[in-house]
Image: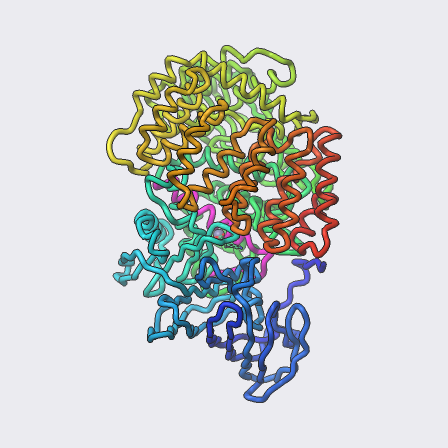
Amino acid sequence: PQTIYLSDYKPFGYIVEAVELTFRLHPTQTRVISKIKFSPNPDAKDGEFFLHGENMTLISAKINGADISPEISAEGLRANAPNDPFVWESEVEISPETNTALEGLYMSNGMYCTQCEAEGFRKITYYPDRPDVMSVFTVRIESDLPVLLSNGNPVKMDNGVAEWHDPWPKPAYLFALVAGELVNYSGDFTTMSGKKVDLNIWVREADLGKCAFGLEALKRSMKWDEDVYGREYDLDVFNIVAVDDFNMGAMENKGLNIFNSSCVLASPETSTDANFERIEAIIAHEYFHNWTGNRITCRDWFQLCLKEGLTVFRDQSFTGDMRSHAVKRIDDAIMLRARQFREDQGPLAHPVRPESFVEINNFYTVTVYEKGAEVIGMLKRLVGDEAYKKALDLYFDRHDGEAATIEDWIKVFEDSTGRDLSQFKLWYSQAGTPHVHVSDSFEDGTYALTLRQVHKPSPGQDTKKPMVIPVAVGLLSPNGDEIVPTTVLELTEEEQTFTFDGLGAKPIPSVLRDFSAPVVLHIDQSDKDREFLLAHDTDAFNKWEAGRTLARNTLIDMITNNAEPNADFLAALESAIKDESLEPAFRALLLGLPSVDDLAQTLAGAGETPDPWEIHAERDRLKRAIAEHCNDTLADLYFAHQVQGEYSPDAVSSGKRSLTNAALAYITLVDGGQTAQRQFAAANNMTQELAALSALITIGMGEEELTDFHHRWQNDRLVMDKWFSLQTALAAPEDASGIARRLTEHAAFDWKNPNRFRSLFGGLTSNTAGFHNPDGSGYALLADWLIKLDAINPQTTARMTTAFDTWKRYDAERQAQMRGELERILGTENLSRDTYEMVSRMLK
Ligand code: HT7
Ligand code: ZN
């Protein structure tokens, strides 16, 4: 397969002035008729006329009304085009029903829908399918189906025909079309300049009762973008459609967002608090793309982080504003460390802006998205809130309607602040997680902090330059007062010392407050200092971090030295969770332990060979010790924070539920499951029900409850996804692959549906000990199914191969088994380009 390089970028030879598309919908013989006005691009050197196009039959092609016979290949067509403005007309035939890859125009439960990012439009018609080609689209849809939607504003709705016009120039990846037997849950929003926008969530009739939360979340997002970024919506309508078969979470098509139904449909009975929060965040994310992604798009796919990093940063700020900044920051850091640091540590590590790819779908990664968001957060921290706002205003003014680059983005900050950001730009090009080592000294009232940055090699990058790392620091006096409030130290050299004068005693430092940079911090602090920070730090993130480090340290000691659980840690944890001045959601986070994978990552980073089974066993031992030590406190918390009355997914109520459910998980370890059984029986919402069921499964009980759950929810696809994932995610290590195998034989295991496939196998691979069964059964089962799925859905398959990306961490036997499975996948006949690229990168 061909590798594409950032350095090879060339503008397209033609400008697309306007696009008119007609769709005659048919499950296997859809006709797509296009009329496109092209004119030569004065900025392009090369006037070659190549249009992308795959998996379609060309019926006719004309230039300026005259039939032509273009040269056709598997990737597209080439024709001789005039050096003056001309009109291109074509008619093609495509087959949505047999399109199982879910890219381009496909069918899901009798409904037509599209997914064009990144390169799906080329499966719909011949077109220059690249993000820097932007144009105005008019779309006509002919079908007997009652609801016919596309981008922009509706122009005409007659029986069997709909016409849509999108006045905003857009790249083809933002094109969308939906047709089906749908109903709408509607509302409206009046924008800051007084324009009324019609809002709709389109679903199947049975799902109408699950739309209210999504619509309110959309209104909150629209308001927030006006208030915080000054961005107003720009069409008469905003449509969202829920689709059951979808490769990812959702898609920001202009005026017609398409959502995986799991990311928009919610009800108290069927969705957990976590589902509600995620739905709110994804609705916000897709909506925010209207400015950061759609009005200003990317010049090429290497610039993906320009829209994704910024939009994730914006949705994270939104969730912080809607809920709790501290809790959101901790949640994001946990996720970043679990997934992005893992990616950075392994064979798939790549820069936030990659420099080459084979299949762009493989670069919708946690590095591009989440580390991309961290980079924006660091930039904001370095320039300050006011300057950030000024820079963003300039960005929107300067680049509205354009396809921009990271250089453009950085330049906006340089021009508005006068700062030289060339060193900062390394965050976009250097892969890997930086390590920051901290040492300190105190003499004559002067406290000195020495910071040293270390960069490990990553694929294709053996040596790296020092980066700009904002390290937020606060100092506490031994009596617990904050003597130096949060100050951002700018680490720009390999090693730098920062001093603080006039101190009466050696302070206790609180370093990397608010997780001010995505780095691994090495600081030699005693357990006593960490207990002190857990009790006194004014920075919520570092307060939590102190507890987490104590937990990690005791676990590592238990794993490597067979030590007993650290009694001081147990006492410090108990007093922290009792502290009623701390919000319940924060205390729930304090009760969470580092995951098995997190501990394996820590051990591997320290040069040890982790054994997931041993880690799992020691983690269980610590959980039991916490349950026994904090028995009374946990029971008090459980009963004192029960939420009474009607269910509401708001931050305060869900925070209380996360605390009581965290307590329940521990209580269940020592009470034989009776509290969980009671909660399961009495639950009137999915959060309570699922937490109780999870607690029971974890102790090897819950069989009856699982059957009952299945019986009640067998007709709800989204709840049944939970039923599948729960069983594989929580199974005991020795049982997990067997349970997963049995579940693949269950009548409801619809493997062609990405949500169902991900539920079962995502559950299994999240169960680190279960997946890494030393007999290799977890690996073999996953590989069998990935090979099967690849033949119909390469994108989802390729993403799920990442379960193997840690293979080099483990012992020789596990390594050999995983390598064997990767080689077996690679040797599969007709393997997709997507999966080929991922597996070969992992084997390198
Ligand atoms: N911009 C979108 C990314 C995307 C996608 C979404 C659904 C299915 C396939 C997809 N390929 C790429 C989603 C987002 O970041 O908002
Ligand atoms: Zn996005």
Q: Is residue 160 left or right of residue 795?
A: left
Q: Position of residue 33 (x, y in %)?
A: 51, 77
Residue visible at 47% across and 20% down? Answer: 502
Q: Is residue 306 visible?
A: yes
In this view, 344 is above or below 625 = below
In the rendered view of the protein, which quadrant contains the N terminus? bottom right
318 in magenta = yes
For residue 395, say whether it is visible: no
Which secondary structure dominates the residues rendered in magenta? helix
Look at 43% across and 57% down and name the residue there: 258
Q: Position of residue 322 (x, y in %)?
A: 34, 41
Specify the farthest residue to the bottom.
66
Viewer-side residue, 340 vs 406: 340
Drawn side of residue 773 relative to residue 570, left or right: right
Q: Position of residue 262 (x, y in %)?
A: 43, 47
Q: How is the image coloured?
A: rainbow
**Quadrant location, the C terminus:** top right
Q: Residue furthest left?
A: 645
Q: Quadrant of residue 289?
A: bottom left
In depth, the one of 344 and 73 nearer the eye is 73
Boundaries of the magenta span: 296-322
- Please give the name of the residue rendered at 68% of the width and 62% of the height, measured from the top-left corner: 8
Query: Is residue 636 placed above or below 512 in the rendered structure?
Result: above
Magenta-span inclusion, residue 373: no
